[in-house]
Image (cartoon, rainbow, N blue to C red):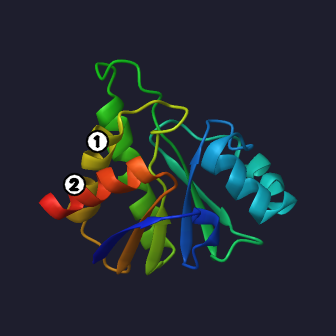
Amino acid sequence: MKIQIIQGDITQISCDAIVNAANNSLLGGGGVDGAIHREAGPELLAECRLLHGCATGDAKVTKAYHLPARYVIHTVGPVYRDGQHDEAKQLQSCYIRCLEKAEEYQCQHIAFPSISTGAYRYPVSQAATIAIETLKNYPCQYVKRIDIVCFDNYTYRTYCQLLKKE
C-alpha cells in the first residue's frame, strides 16, 4: 500500500472514497466537513440525515454525489482536551474504522484529511504520528493507495517529515 502526503483541497481529489472529518450529527459543519457538504450538494445532507449521527471514533458511508469519488466515509474524531481522555485511542479508531469501511466497499484509493487537527485542536505532530502508524500497520486487501490531504502548509510539512521517518 502506498501512502502519500498532498497539500490541497480534499474535495478535488479523484478517488474511490473521500474521508470526511465530521461532527457527531453528520449534518455538516465547518472546515473540511463544510467543504465536503458544499461540493457534494444537498443530496449528501439528505442521506446523512438517514444515518442518525455517528459516535466518536466510528465511521459511516454515503454516496459522494457531486464529489470526484464514489463514496464519502464520515468519521468523527475526538475533541482534544489534554491527551488524558482516550483521545489517541479514539483517533486511531477513526482511521481503523475508515479502513474497515474502505475494505468493505472494496475501495482501492482513499483520501484522508488530517482528522481532529482543526477545530478539534489535536496537536498536529501527535495526530500525524497516530495517522501514519495506524495506516501503515493496517492489513489492507483492497486499499492500494492512501492520500493524506493537508489543507495548510504546517500540517503538510509535519506529515511529510513524519512519513519520511517511518
| Residue that numbered label 1 is attached to | 125
Please name the residue shown 69% across and 68% down the image.
Answer: 63
The image position of residue 118, as x and y in percent, is: 51, 38
Type of residue at label 2? Leu
Marks 1 and 2, how far apart at CA: 8 Å
Along the line of sight, the residue nearer the viewer: 13 or 95: 13
Tell me: 151 left or right of 42: left
Q: Is residue 84 above or below residue 9?
A: above
The image position of residue 84, as x and y in percent, is: 28, 19
Can you name the residue that lies furthest to the left here?
A: 165
Please name the residue shown 78% across and 47% down the image.
Answer: 49
Residue 85 figure quarter: top left
Please name the residue shown 77% across and 72% down the image.
Answer: 66
Label drawn at residue 162: 2
Tell me: 90 left or right of 44: left
Q: Are marks 1 and 2 in contact (CB under 8 Å)?
A: yes
The image position of residue 56, as x and y in percent, is: 49, 36
Residue 81 figure quarter: top left
**Secondary element at image label 1:** helix
